[in-house]
């Protein structure tokens, strides 16, 4: 039975953009599991699976519903131990937790300021109203004010990736010789930027760009095909 992944899109369902959902797209592909992705707009999410979750990603696997990207990854690791590992043990889980924290507190903060108005403009009118109301309340300013320093945020963004560059001096992926869930956490961030802003805001020769190219080529270029 195929797994169902509920994800997030704007007016174009062929371009789902949630960084957290992209983590799970990559995780499911890594595990070699069949799945159907169902992208939905913001305001439709509370109705899925009888209100099972206010946010995506959410997966249905048979009679199991699992939400939250990290919890989904842990579930897939436990439910499908015969498939390639997303963590390679407890050390990989701990590393992924650290990468998740770094990504959400440093990289996501920057990406939000770079792309928040562009995300708004990708949405249907009802979702634009929801997005503006919730994000302005959360961020403490209008979308226009938050975006007013966008050029400076783009200029400062590459320096925030220095920890990843340091790690890539020693190995081709964050997970070592091959990718693990820690890699997919950061891939999700870059898919968010690629789809919503049209750019990674890095130079083509940046070691992080070269790592991302390797990740985008995984699984038949599934992630690269959406931009």
Image (spheres, helix red, strand yellow):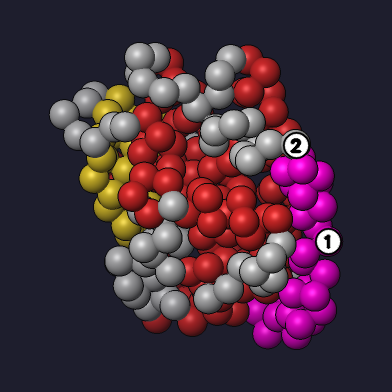
- Of residues 132 and 80, the one nearer the viewer is 80
**Coordinates of residue 81 in the picture (x, y in percent):** 39, 14
**Rounded to the nearest whole Å, what is the CA distance between mark 1 and mark 2?**
19 Å
Residue under pointer 2: 170
**Coordinates of residue 211 in the picture (x, y in percent):** 61, 51
**Coordinates of residue 6 in the picture (x, y in percent):** 33, 47
Spot the residue most to the left: 1
Q: Tell me, yes or no, whether the highlighted magenta stretch contains residue 149.
A: yes
Q: Quadrant of residue 92?
A: top right
The relative height of residue 219 versus residue 97 in the rendered view (above or below) is: below
- Of residues 180 and 49, the one nearer the viewer is 180
Point out the stretch of residues depicted in magenta: 143-169
Q: Crowdedness of circle 2 by 10 Å Cα count: few (<14), some, many (20+)? A: few
The answer to whether any part of residue 221 appears in the image is yes
Q: Crowdedness of circle 1 by 10 Å Cα count: few (<14), some, many (20+)? A: few
The relative height of residue 193 versus residue 32 in the rendered view (above or below) is: below
Residue under pointer 1: 159
């Amino acid at each position: 039975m195929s797994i169902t992944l509920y994800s997030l899109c704007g007016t174009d369902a062929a371009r789902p953009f949630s960084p957290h959902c992209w983590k799970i797209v990559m995780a499911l592909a890594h595990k070699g599991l069949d799945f159907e992705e169902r992208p939905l707009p913001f305001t439709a999410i509370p109705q899925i699976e009888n209100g099972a979750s206010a946010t995506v990603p959410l997966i249905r696997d048979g009679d199991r519903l699992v939400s939250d990207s990290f919890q989904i990854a842990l579930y897939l690791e436990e439910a499908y131990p015969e498939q390639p590992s997303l963590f390679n043990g407890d050390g990989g889980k701990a590393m992924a937790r650290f990468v998740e924290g770094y990504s959400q507190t440093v990289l996501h903060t920057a990406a939000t300021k770079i792309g928040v108005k562009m995300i708004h403009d990708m949405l249907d009118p009802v979702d634009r109203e929801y997005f503006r109301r919730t994000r302005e309340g959360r961020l403490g300013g209008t979308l226009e004010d938050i975006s007013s320093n966008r050029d400076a945020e783009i200029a400062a963004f590459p320096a925030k990736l220095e920890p990843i560059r340091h790690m890539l001096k020693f190995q081709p992926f964050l997970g070592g010789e091959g990718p693990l869930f820690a890699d997919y956490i950061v891939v999700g961030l870059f898919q968010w930027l690629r789809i919503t802003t049209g750019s990674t805001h890095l130079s083509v020769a940046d070691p992080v760009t070269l790592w991302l190219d390797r990740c985008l080529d995984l699984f038949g270029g599934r992630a690269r095909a959406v931009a």
